[in-house]
Amino acid sequence: MNKRKTNPTSPNVAPSQMSPLCIDADACNPRIPHSYPRRVLLAVSGLSPQIVTETIYALTQTQGSPWFPTEIHILTTTAGEQRARLSLFSKDKNWFAKLCAEYDLPPIHFDADNIHILHGSQGEPLEDIRSVADNSAAADAITAKVRELCADPASAVHVSIAGGRKSMGFYVGYALSLYGRSQDRLSHVLVSDPYEHNLDFFYPTRQSCVLETRDGGMVDMKDAKVTLANIPFVSLRSGLPQKLLHGNASFNETVEAAREALAPPKLQINLRERYVVAGGKTLKLAPTAIAMLAVFARRTKAGQGAVPAPNKEVPDLEWAQWYLAEYRICSGGEWASAEATQRTLAKGMDGRWFSTALTRLHQELRKALGPVATNYCVHDGGKRPRRYSLQLDASAIQFIS
């Protein structure tokens, strides 16, 4: 870890260019990533750990609004871990400390413990990513790390895809699309020739420092050009169920959930078995909830329009008949329950009963589907007088048995 106590701004940056850090994460501006109190640089790396120092240099020295990380994490293989540890932290090389000292960077939490080795399907450390199983395990580990870092509302995460195998860069970029927020960023670092791919180059130095090129020539490291290429990404986070945002879902499970969120909604209803297929998932619903959903699904398939709710004070007999027709089917052999409901609604359904049943339906859908549930909830039209309907095409609804 860099424990130097230094000025929190680089000598090249005027204090007026720096936004004050947020004390309250909720008050931070997502359009100003450097205002967040926790700023995390996450990089995938293979045998070129210099992408870390190059990226730090680019973020802090070449941007109109410099971004100073408070911590750094690397995802790599066993071979990559050794290369990163020895070149960035060893007494002989120590390129990370050299960069921090030369550019007077503020303290950054980064040491050997922040270099995370990817593991295979059997839990073994990966020396390289060669097989389908290795790729799958690496994808899950990378996704888990991105999900973890993006779960903190006080953090702004900057992901670099500059290092590692191409599949690693793809996975970390895709994971950021799945879990990233407005304050998070994705980038690639570009290094000018002949410094690119030179294992002895780590960043442009302030003072003259001679470097030997692969063809035997000599160049000065202070003349190198390092550019940060920001990569826009589309965030799919809002379409994921809450349990995927905070759970341990695999890469494939998360991608499938995102696909369902973007796919045209389709609804299948099996009243006798009391389940629906919505958002690509099979959901068991309570009789009260599925009967209410069936009423609106039946009306939509029949081409009937939106309908007002029953009056709060005056029971509506027609509404009771619609509802009980569906409830009798889904109650199955539980006649006592069906008869009790029938007695309750014998004189009609009032607005309070309607509201309770509709609320239960929406709660069950949202718990199982997250934001995707909106496609299958009953809408009230958004204005008064309220008129209720499903916002689905008739062709998207199917009753099955």
Image (cartoon, rainbow, N blue to C red):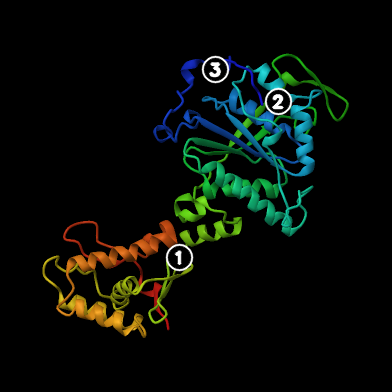
Q: In which quarter of the view is residue 220 placed?
A: top right
Q: Is residue 91 left or right of residue 59?
A: right
Q: In which quarter of the view is residue 272 placed?
A: bottom left
Which numbered disc, 2 or 3, marks the residue closer to the eye?
2
227 up-or-down from 390: above or below: above
* Mark 3 vs 1, N-terminal side: 3
Residue 184 vs residue 394, the one in the foreground: 184
Q: Secondary structure at mark 2?
A: helix
Q: Position of residue 48 (x, y in %)?
A: 75, 36
* Distance from the alpha carbon under mark 2 to that under mark 3: 20 Å
Which image quadrant: the N terminus?
A: top right
Which image quadrant: the C terminus?
A: bottom left
Q: Residue at x 79, y 23 (%)?
A: 91
Does the image show residue 312?
Answer: yes
Q: Residue at x 14, y 67 (%)?
A: 311
- Label 1 neighbour load within 10 Å: few <14, some 14-19, many 20+: many
Q: Residue at x 79, y 37 (%)?
A: 82
* Mark 2 vs 3, N-terminal side: 3
Q: Secondary structure at mark 1?
A: loop
Q: Position of residue 104 (x, y in %)?
A: 63, 17
Q: Pointer 2: what residue?
A: 96
282 up-or-down from 189: above or below: below
Residue 24 vs residue 177, the one in the foreground: 24
Q: Amino acid at mark 2?
A: Phe
* Mark 1 vs 2, N-terminal side: 2
Q: Position of residue 297 (x, y in %)?
A: 32, 74
Q: Secondary structure at mark 3?
A: loop
Q: Pointer 3: what residue?
A: 13
